Amino acid sequence: MTEGRATAAVQDDHSVRAETEERLVARYREHGVAADTVRGAVAEAWDRLAGARVRTFLPILVERSVRLRLSDA
């Protein structure tokens, strides 16, 4: 992968992560969960999957992980 492609991939990852995070913050705000709590759960889930070679399904996997973690919240 060239340096330009690698930079684009990192930017795409950052953008997708931010979109996923904001969507989950909005969803859980309706249930009274603090934004920082949701952001922490997203960060933890995303970091756990950071080494994944196939990145396509990361948002879905992160959402599932956050939903499971915050189901008691």
Image (tube, helix red, strand yellow):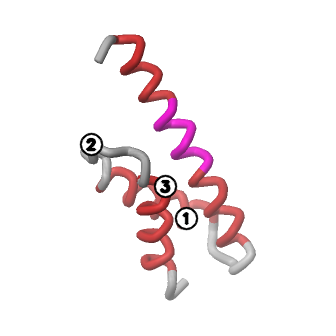
Numbered disc in front, either 2 or 1 = 2
Q: Which residues lie in the magenta part?
A: 12-19
Q: Main secondary structure of the magenta part?
A: helix
- Left/right placement of residue 12 relative to residue 65 reads right
Mark 2 or mark 1, earlier in chain:
1
Q: Amino acid at mark 2?
A: Arg
- Residue in view at x 37 percent, y 21 percent: 6
- Residue 1 in picture, x, y percent from top left: 29, 18
- Mark 3 sits on what residue? 59
Q: Which residue shows up at 48% across the image and 61% down it? A: 60
Task: Indicate the secondary structure of the residue bearing disc 3.
Answer: helix
Left/right placement of residue 1 relative to residue 64 reads left
**In this figure, what is the number of numbered marks?**
3
Q: Amino acid at mark 1?
A: Val
Q: Is residue 21 above or below residue 26?
A: above
Q: Are dots 3 and 2 in contact, CB under 8 Å? A: no
Tag 2 residue: 53
Q: Please check the rendered image and state whether residue 17 is part of the magenta-colored stretch, yes or no.
A: yes
Check disc 3 and give the amino acid type. Pro
- Badge 2 marks a residue whose secondary structure is loop
Query: Residue lying farthest bottom?
Result: 72
Q: Position of residue 15 (x, y in %)?
A: 56, 37
Name which quarter of the figure residue 9 lies in.
Answer: top left
Q: Secondary structure at mark 1?
A: helix
Q: Quadrant of the C terminus?
A: bottom right
Whole-angstrom CA distance, mark 3 to mark 2, is: 14 Å
Q: Residues within 10 Å of mark 1 (few under 14, many from 20)?
A: many
Residue 38: assigned label: 1
